[in-house]
Amino acid sequence: MLRLSTFFTRKKIAEAVAAPSAPDALSVEQIALIRTTFRKVVPISTTAAELFYDRLFFIAPDVKPLFVGESGSPEMAAQGKKLMAMLAIVVQELDNPDVLMPAAADLAKRHVGYSVKAAHYAPVGEALLWALEQGLQDEFTPDVKEAWASAYGVLSSAMIQAAYGREAA
Ligand code: HEM
């Protein structure tokens, strides 16, 4: 399979996949699958975001108090929009590490200020895959699942490393 070595530098790939269950870097085919399936989720992004947060708070109820808006109560509709906008940038820049890596590192460091811990990245990834499965239905094939899981794995490992250090990733 053709590997896209531009996704991350070799050193970054080695660091990102250092965690035991971390996936390999993405192939060109996987990036294409992610882009096509994300385009199908965009028109239903409000529902997808709702599904994502419902699932997240079901599997990881302890993270719910972290999502407190300016009003003091969760503003999940606004939060869902921010998440989808950020995912759109990630999907667009998957093969452009010079843009993606600094943005992911900054995002991860801001998340430390939201009281997010390294351990929270796993349930967020699980909820993301679950929401994609609900949104895409039959089109959520094993290849599509693997592509998204790999992308989230590489991205979250890089974010965890940027925010909490190499040993946490
Ligand atoms: C790839 C992973 C993730 C992406 C793309 C993402 C995206 C975002 C974005 C775009 C924002 C808006 C604020 C900003 O840009 O700083 C945000 C805020 C936030 N995220 Fe994430 N996030 C990710 C992982 C996580 C994880 C693992 C948690 C843990 C539960 C989390 C919890 C939060 C919280 C609590 C806020 C602030 C909510 C508020 O304003 O009240 N995120 N996230």
Image (cartoon, rainbow, N blue to C red):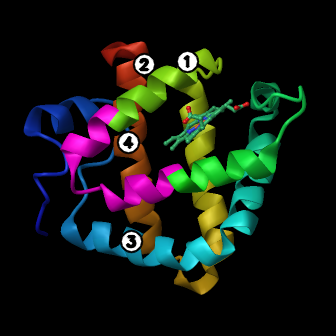
Residue at image point 74% right, 48% down: 78
Query: Which residue does the numbered mark 4 point to in the structure image?
Result: 155
Q: Position of residue 134 (x, y in %)?
A: 69, 71
Residue at image point 79% right, 27% down: 62
Residue at image point 43% right, 48% down: 152
Q: Position of residue 88 (x, y in %)?
A: 46, 59
- Earlier in the chain: of badge 2 and badge 1, it is 1
Q: Position of residue 162 (x, y in %)?
A: 36, 22
Query: Which residue does the numbered mark 2 point to in the structure image?
Result: 163
Q: Quadrant of residue 94?
A: bottom left
- Which amino acid does the dot numbered 3 rest on? Arg
Q: Is residue 20 visible?
A: no
In whole angstroms, how far apart are the C-alphas of marks 4 and 3?
16 Å
Which mark is nearer the camera, 4 or 3? Answer: 3
Say which element carries label 3: helix
Query: How many neighbours does mark 1 have within 10 angstroms: few (below 14), some (14-19), or many (20 or more)?
Result: some
Query: Which residue does the numbered mark 1 point to in the structure image?
Result: 112
Determine whether label 1 and label 4 are within 8 Å by CB.
Answer: no
Query: How many neighbours does mark 3 have within 10 angstroms: few (below 14), some (14-19), or many (20 or more)?
Result: some
- Earlier in the chain: of badge 4 and badge 3, it is 3
Query: Which residue does the numbered mark 3 point to in the structure image?
Result: 35
- Earlier in the chain: of badge 2 and badge 4, it is 4
Residue at image point 55% right, 34% down: 121
